[in-house]
Image (spheres, grey):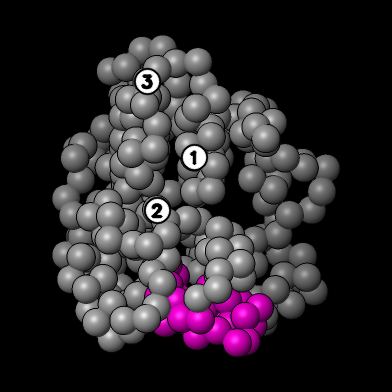
């Protein structure tokens, strides 16, 4: 997205294989790879659509319906979409569209949570974040039993049945704001455990517990300070998006950025 928005600037990818598995769960016009397990998550849910089913196929099933695309997607998927969204603004983005029906890709859980918070019909893709998808209602019950005085924050990429049991559903940036403003002193954090470092740093008088200790994204952890230093020294893995993809992808990002 950085290169799409600022093509004149140098954008470096610090680790070439630090990709997002969820972004790989949807393709514009080719079959997607199918993974039957993820690190620490051996029983992911089955996909609703066959591997060869594509973004263009779902658009053909619902002609004229705008596509709302999570920023955790590839550039060509953004280019095939009408507008982008984040976990923080997905409902605002959906509400900004004149259509009473939207296609929301690729995260099914974020889509279902958005559907709960809008009167519009949300047609969901079947992708998921394996870090959040693994959280079950039993995990929520266990965490509450271990920390009965803690406020439970959950990211909307979690399953809807887990979100229904949370005290506060919000994005990672929302968790930072909520924890800082809250009078509570203990929090259960339902997102990738890397966020706990910043939560603890910004709120030294408060205690934060992971909802599950294995909510770890191996791909995120590939990026280290050594990676950043090497990229800056060697200027390697420069990201350039071809204009035939960049221009329509930028249009989708710009539409999102115009929403207040």
User: Percent x, y for residue 73?
Assistant: 49, 45
Q: Residue at x 50, y 27 (%)?
A: 95
Q: Please tell me whether residue 204 belongs to the stretch shown in magenta.
A: yes
Q: Residues within 10 Å of mark 3 (few under 14, many from 20)?
A: some
Q: Residue 132 at x, y = what percent?
A: 34, 62
Secondary structure of the residue carrying numbered label 2: loop
The answer to whether mark 1 and mark 2 are in CB contact below 8 A is yes
How many residues crowd around disc 1 within 10 Å: few (fewer than 14), some, or many (20 or more)? Answer: many
- Give the answer, above or below, for where 18 lies relative to 79: below
**Residue 194 included in the magenta stretch of the image:** yes
For mark 1, give the secondary structure. Answer: helix
Judging by the rendered image, the residue that carries numbered circle 1 is: 90
Quarter in which the C terminus is drawn:
top right
Quadrant of the rendered structure where residue 231 is?
Answer: bottom right
- On the picture, is 70 further left or further right than 225? left
Q: CA distance from mark 2 to mark 3?
A: 20 Å
Q: Position of residue 40 (x, y in %)?
A: 27, 75
Residue 28: horizontal and vertical position, in percent? 41, 32
Check disc 3 and report the residue beneath it.
101
Find the residue positioned furthest to the right: 8
- Which range of residues does the magenta coloring cover? 185-209
Mark closer to the chain start, 2 or 3: 3
Question: Between residues 116 and 70, which one lies in front from this camera angle?
Answer: 116
Find the distance from the CA under tag 1 to the CA under tag 3.
14 Å
Q: Nearer the viewer, residue 178 or 41?
A: 178
Q: Which residue occupies 69% across, 48% down? A: 2
Nearer to the camera, 185 or 119: 185
Quarter in which the N terminus is drawn: top right
216 versus 160 height, above or below? below
């Amino acid at each position: 997205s950085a290169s799409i928005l600022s093509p004149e600037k140098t954008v470096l990818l610090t680790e070439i294989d630090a990709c997002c598995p969820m972004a790989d769960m949807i393709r514009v016009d080719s079959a997607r790879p199918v993974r039957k397990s993820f690190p620490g998550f051996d029983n992911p849910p089955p996909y609703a659509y066959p591997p060869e089913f594509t973004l263009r196929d779902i658009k053909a099933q619902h002609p004229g319906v705008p596509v709302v695309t999570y920023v955790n997607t590839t550039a060509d998927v953004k280019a095939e979409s009408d507008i982008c969204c984040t976990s923080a603004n997905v409902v605002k983005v959906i509400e900004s569209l004149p259509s009473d029906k939207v296609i929301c890709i690729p995260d099914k859980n974020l889509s279902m949570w958005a559907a709960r918070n809008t009167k519009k019909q949300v047609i969901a893709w079947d992708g998921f974040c394996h870090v959040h998808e693994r959280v079950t209602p039993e995990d929520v019950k266990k965490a509450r039993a271990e920390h009965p005085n803690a406020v439970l924050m959950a990211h909307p990429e979690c399953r809807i049945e887990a979100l229904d049991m949370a005290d506060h559903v919000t994005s990672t940036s929302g968790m930072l704001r909520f924890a800082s403003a809250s009078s509570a002193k203990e929090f259960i954090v339902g997102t990738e455990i890397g966020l706990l470092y910043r939560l603890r740093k910004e709120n030294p008088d408060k205690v934060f517990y992971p909802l599950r200790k294995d909510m770890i994204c191996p791909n995120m952890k590939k990026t280290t300070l050594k990676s950043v230093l090497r990229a800056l020294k060697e200027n390697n893995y420069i990201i350039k998006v071809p204009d035939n993809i960049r221009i329509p992808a930028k249009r989708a990002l710009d539409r999102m950025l115009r929403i207040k």
